Image: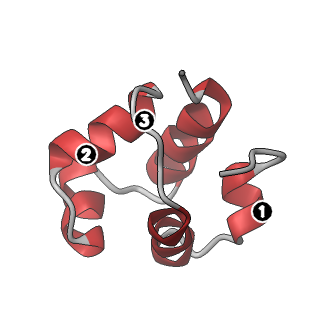
Amino acid sequence: MEYDQLAQRLRAFRKLKGYTQQELAERLGVSVAVLGSLERGTRKPEAKLLERIAENLNISYQELTGDYKV
């Protein structure tokens, strides 16, 4: 299963905030491979990780996920 909308939102917000994948991955304590797979929509994200991503990007969980349900 792919998570295209979430992946697009994640990438767009990351770029909007000026982070590289490497920088955001380090802030989250995950590998670049994990972040990259989330941005490609090939990995199912855990809710706790999505919360940490939203917090690090200074956006709400709802802004990050839209209508997406984990």
Residue tagged 2: 34
- Please, is residue 48 above or below residue 13 in the view? below
User: Which amino acid does the dot numbered 1 rest on?
Assistant: Gln
User: Which amino acid does the dot numbered 3 rest on?
Assistant: Glu
In the image, is 68 to the left or to the right of 51? right
Residue tagged 3: 39
Q: Residue at x 47, y 66 (%)?
A: 53
Q: Residue at x 75, y 59 (%)?
A: 63
Residue 40 placement: quadrant? top left
In the image, is 47 to the left or to the right of 59? left
- Please, is residue 51 above or below residue 6 in the view? below
Measure the alpha-carbon separation of dots 3 and 2. Answer: 9 Å
Q: Residue at x 21, y 71 (%)?
A: 29
- Helix, strand, or loop for circle 3? helix
- What is the x, y in percent for residue 37? 32, 34
Residue nearest the observer in this picture, 4 or 15: 4
Image quarter (top left, top right, bottom left or bottom right) of the N terminus? top right
Residue closest to the far right: 67
Residue tagged 1: 62
- What is the x, y in percent for residue 2? 54, 22
Point out the frontmost of discs 3 and 2: 2
